[in-house]
Image: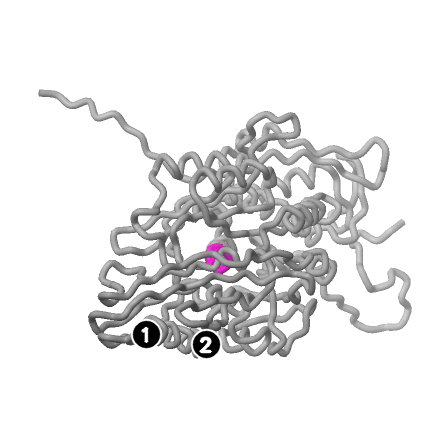
Amino acid sequence: MPENVSFNEIPVDIRTPGQYIEIDNSRAVSGLPNMPRKMLVLGQRLSTGSVPAGQIVQVTSREQAIAYFGRGSQLAEMLSAARVANQTSDIRALALDDLVAGVAATKTITVTGPATHTGLLNLWIGGQRIRVNIASGTAATAIATAINAAVNAALDLPVTSAVAGAVVTLTARHKGECGNAIDVRANYYADEVVPGGVGITIAAGTAGAGNPDVAAAIAAIGGDQFYTIVSPWTDSANLTALKAEMDARWGPMSQRTGHVFAGLVGTQSALAAIGATHNSPHLTFVGVNGSPISPWVRAAVIAAVCEASGSIDPARPFQTLPLPGLLPPVETARFTRLERDLLLRDGISTTVVDAGGNELIERIITTYQTNQYGIEDISYLDLETKWTVDYIRYAVRARIALRYPRFKLADDGTQFAPGQAVVTPRLIRGELLSLFRELELAGLVENFEQFKRDLLVVRSNQDPNRINAVIPPDIINQFRVFAAAVQFRL
């Protein structure tokens, strides 16, 4: 007969005298578990960076990002912005080199003159301002030369510059399609004006082409888990590969959840057309029109803000969270409420601008829109839902693993001593009910009576060593809309 107490390390037949006391931590941890989370920023590096392509490193500051991936690199820009928005999360980075066969995008700035007034030319490139002092009487070619010098002196810009006569040619530091989205403009703020007599015409030149293959990044990640991932590449091939990888990781045999954020720029109709071609609970597009900030930088900031909030409480809505460091779209290009509502029906997350000119999250959604039968399905519409469900899954795993690490399994009603390491379906059911109450107190679920009624815990008919369960939590929702009818009286 076995002893009444199930020991992990002390033999039942030891004969040498002594006091043998083992330490068992299976009941040490109480309450809900802390889910480990890391954020990964993908991007392109420059040859001046010290960290080679395909190596994952932790980044804690802008200075580190520049040293690791090169000043002016896409990845350094993204990480610098992410760290401004989130100074607490564990942020890692993984760089890829430019595609050798890729093409770097160019844009031209054609200057006319001469200047008839002295003043400052405010040139914005990828959301960074370059200021050129122009004296009255300065010729167009001299102004172009001054612009060229100012651009090349700004080492954090995503472009380099060359000048020929009165034409300045800006070339993206990286090859690839991303360079096409680098915003170049004269003036952003309402009080910025081009000095009198000076004309600035900005035009697209060579189209960038050939993004790096994200398959190399996926291979480098291997078995590691990153909860929030930022991708600067939005071409179909790379997004398809990322979505497939996230699908595989989400499944029950892996349970290494990840979520991809990517940025887009365009009109409401252009963004809706892109969103309509995707249908994944593991991808979020953030789209705007008219902002000087590059879309990959915008994606890094929004992902960083969501990661900071979601790690504290996955169910609390992201709406109204500020987006530090982002310049909002110019007022004439901002989407109307109707346009934003339409975007939210086509898989595009939205932002708004407050009275102080600060950009805020309005709603973060996934691109999941229909089920496998093509029927509209809102089950994974909001990112908060996906993250809450995933946390509940993690909490269940942690509770069972901690409470019953080396237990025997018996039917309900089996008579065994209280000290025995034996579990039954009824005990597991009680544990899950207790866990639900803790989740309820944390504001992650509701409707305990429904959960208790629908919870199913049974011993498998095929495998005597297995318990099967159906866990039916009612996920808490987000307060997004208040509607009322004012029925006044006279």
Q: What percent of the width, then of the height, locates residue 243?
A: 65, 46
Q: Position of residue 246 (x, y in %)?
A: 66, 48
Q: Residue at x 56, y 34 (%)?
A: 369
Most foreground residue, 39 or 47: 47
| Mark 2 → mark 1, Cα distance in angstroms | 12 Å
Q: Return the residue nearer the eye: 340 or 246.
A: 340
Number of dots carrying numbers: 2
* Type of amino acid under label 1: Val
Question: Residue at label 2?
Answer: 152
Number of the label disc, if any, that sits on residue 132 = 1
Mark 1 is surrounded, within 10 Å at the Cα level, by few (under 14), some (14 to 19) or many (20 or more) other residues, namely some
The answer to which of marks 2 and 1 sits earlier in the sequence is: 1
**Residues in magenta, as a range:** 294-302
**Residue 298 falls within the magenta-colored stretch:** yes
Residue found at x 65% / y 51%: 238
**Res. 410 image quadrant:** top right
Residue 358 falls left or right of residue 464: left
Q: Is residue 248 visible?
A: yes
Q: In the displayed structure, does residue 187 sit left or right of residue 106?
A: left
